[in-house]
Amino acid sequence: MSVSPSSPLALHAAQAPRLATLANGLRTVTIPMPWRQTVSLSVFIRTGSLHESARLNGISHVVEHMAFKGTATRDCQRINLDAEALGAEVNAHTDKDHTAFHIEGLPGDLPAFVDWLADIVLNSSFPAEELERERRVIEQEFSEFEDDPTSVAFQLLDRACYGARHAAGRPIIGSRANILRFSREDLLAYAQAQYTACNVVVAVAGPVDGEAFTRRVEHAFGAMPTGQPNALTAPLWQGGLKARRLAGSGQCQVLLGFEAPSLGERLDSAEHLPHVLAASLLGEGMSSPLLDEIRERRGLAYHVACSADILPLYGQFLIEGATAPAQAEEFLQAVQQLLQRQADGPLDPVALARARKQLQMRALRALEQPARRMEGAAQELFHFGQLRDATEAMAQLQAVTPAQVQKVLEGLLRPNRPRPAVALAGSVPQRARACAEALFS
């Protein structure tokens, strides 16, 4: 793929991220974005629900909440005021493979932001009285989760894909019993074990002096213990059907999952890329076969999409949709028929070209988004130990052949394939459940 000197990819190459490693193993990433008027700073820790035992399921999320509730020198109110007095916006999230803390504000305040995040990451005291209050907050979050058919369907899908014995089959938020049981001592022990320097990336994006930034991070995080890499084990695919009826729901949420390759062990691993391109071809955009057939021509769903969720140790090829309960059976049949037509071929060259362009556009847009850039860099460092070149990654994707994409589509319904995973949530008719069993067992 040729790249214009003025294109975003060429500009990215000219202003490539700056990587530095401190003596304790912590890594910093500086992403130059000199045109920005603000700066974004994030601390990523390689620990999430995938690192939890069943007994500790949900603890990463609770630690993330509690990090803002007090440190050795500041209480909850002071933590909030110190950030907001600088006009900063603060957030955090817990994912399957990492936890992250974010702050965004004016570039001149970056040294204060580094110190602020270092304090909550390194010195959180998890006050017992704050933990009791925060349990109630997380319980409300849990209730929202349980009332949302989409969230429930994705939880059921993970359980169907990987079972309950592997962490990949358990929810990030954990269980109510665990949330109510975790003690201050549990949180302290978990943070001490998991929050170590070799498992931390501190990333910044904006008009930043990379060397000065790294010096500030070293001042704030330099005493953090090195620790050992927080290791993961790959789950085994299981497949099967999981369904849950939710009182008061007016829709049936449908998820179909097929096994897909992981990211692989090397930056140049490409086994997953045909699945990424096949998913875009099948269900990205209103002109894609999935949306055109299911929504535009047959009116079976307002929302329907296809994606490839490719993670370091496993992958999922997903089809999702929300449909009326009375149409759920027809929806499943229509999806199965569409997949069969795509498997039978031939591949539409116009659709394939459209999918390539959409993925190129998505990659270019990501280069303009600070949060996406920083999280992507952290995940690459955690898994590969180095940063991926955006130009090379796009060239790899464009090199995927039509035959490779056709092979993916043919494999979705082949008789000897791994059993698909199906999740139904909301208002789930028995006929839809039986239909899913018959079509995708």
Image: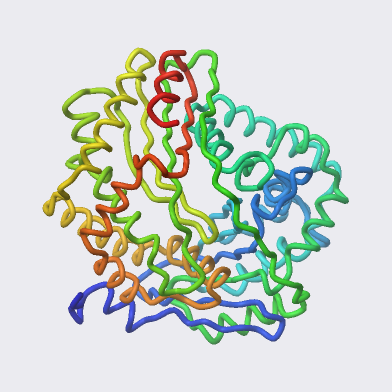
Image coordinates for residue 348, horizontal then vertical, percent: 14, 49
Toward which corner of the image does residue 43 lie, by quadrant?
Answer: bottom right
Q: Position of residue 247 (x, y in %)?
A: 54, 14
**Relative image position of residue 342 (x, y in whole percent):** 22, 42
Would residue 148 be found to the left or right of residue 231 on screen? left
Height in image: 139 above or below 204? above
Q: Can you name the residue that lies furthest to the left here?
A: 350
Q: Quadrant of residue 326?
A: top left
Q: How is the image coloured?
A: rainbow
Q: In which quadrant will I find the N terminus? A: bottom left
In this rendering, the count of numbered labels is 0
Q: Closer to the camera, 344 or 223?
A: 344
Residue 325: image location, x then y, percent: 39, 15
Direction from residue 238 to residue 194 in the image, left or right: right
* The C terminus, quarter of image: top left
Q: Residue at x 64, y 63 (%)?
A: 45
| Residue situated in front as seen by the camera: 399 or 296 | 399
Q: Who's the residue at 60% across and 56% down the image?
A: 234
Residue at 27% x, 45% y is 284
